Amino acid sequence: MQLNGLIFTLPKEIKLLIGAFIIVLSIGFFTGLLFVGETSSTNPNGIEEQYLGNEDDENATVMRFKKSDQEMLTLVHNHILSMAIIFFLVGLLVAITKLNNKLKIFLIVEPFVSVVLTFGGLYLLWKGMLWMKYIVMFSGILMTLTYSLSVLIVFKQLFQKR
């Protein structure tokens, strides 16, 4: 079965379903990024403070406490499972686009690596490996860029005439 370019041959109803799915999924994805921005997790020190707390900082404007075992395990578990499903579905859609094979494989596989590095990295940061905050930040940015590029390609090809 030839998958490359299959998106062009899908019936209109399926294209509309995929388009609606991509829009709603993207609203959810980017709302999550707004939350990250609101919690000061958009820089390495903010990431560290969000999970390890800032009780020692007398000048802190917002007091944060180190996350508990249960909070961290819940966060890592929920994000890894939900993002695995998100990137599996987006990967299936990318698989049926017409793209260079190496780019396609990168867009399909990279998000899974970033999910493990981002949320595994948060857990390791919480456990005391402070340098992981840089890995978390880099992998989070890469995951977002990969997601954005993937959905733009799918959306463009979804309504493009062959």
Image (cartoon, rainbow, N blue to C red):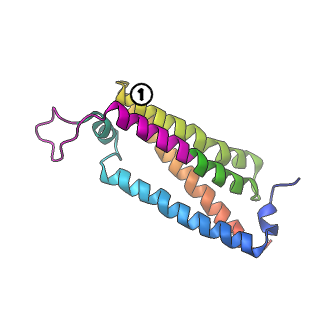
Of 81 and 118, nearer the camera is: 81
What is the span of residues highlighted in magenta in the rendered image? Answer: 54-83
Q: Is residue 16 left or right of residue 63?
A: right
Q: Position of residue 133 (x, y in %)?
A: 38, 34
Question: Looking at the rendering, in which quadrant would you find the C terminus?
Answer: bottom right
Q: Position of residue 85 (x, y in %)?
A: 60, 48
Q: Position of residue 86 (x, y in %)?
A: 58, 51
Q: Is residue 73 magenta?
A: yes
As displayed, is residue 80 above or below residue 12? above
As displayed, is residue 122 above or below residue 156? above
Residue type for callout 1: Leu
Asked whether the viewer can see residue 100, the reply is yes
For mark 1, does the 10 Å Cα neighbourhood hold few (<14), some (14 to 19), or many (20 or more) residues?
Answer: some
Q: Which residue is mark 1?
A: 124
Taking the spot 53% from the left edge, 61% from the top edge, the residue there is 26
Taking the spot 82% from the left edge, 55% from the top edge, the residue there is 3
Q: Is residue 33 left or right of residue 156?
A: left
Taking the spot 61% from the left edge, 42% from the top edge, the residue there is 110
Asked whether the viewer can see residue 139, the reply is no
As displayed, is residue 94 above or below residue 102? below
Q: Residue furthest front?
A: 70
Q: Quadrant of residue 93?
A: bottom right
Of 58 and 72, nearer the camera is: 72
Q: Is residue 152 left or right of residue 33?
A: right
As displayed, is residue 55 above or below residue 20? above
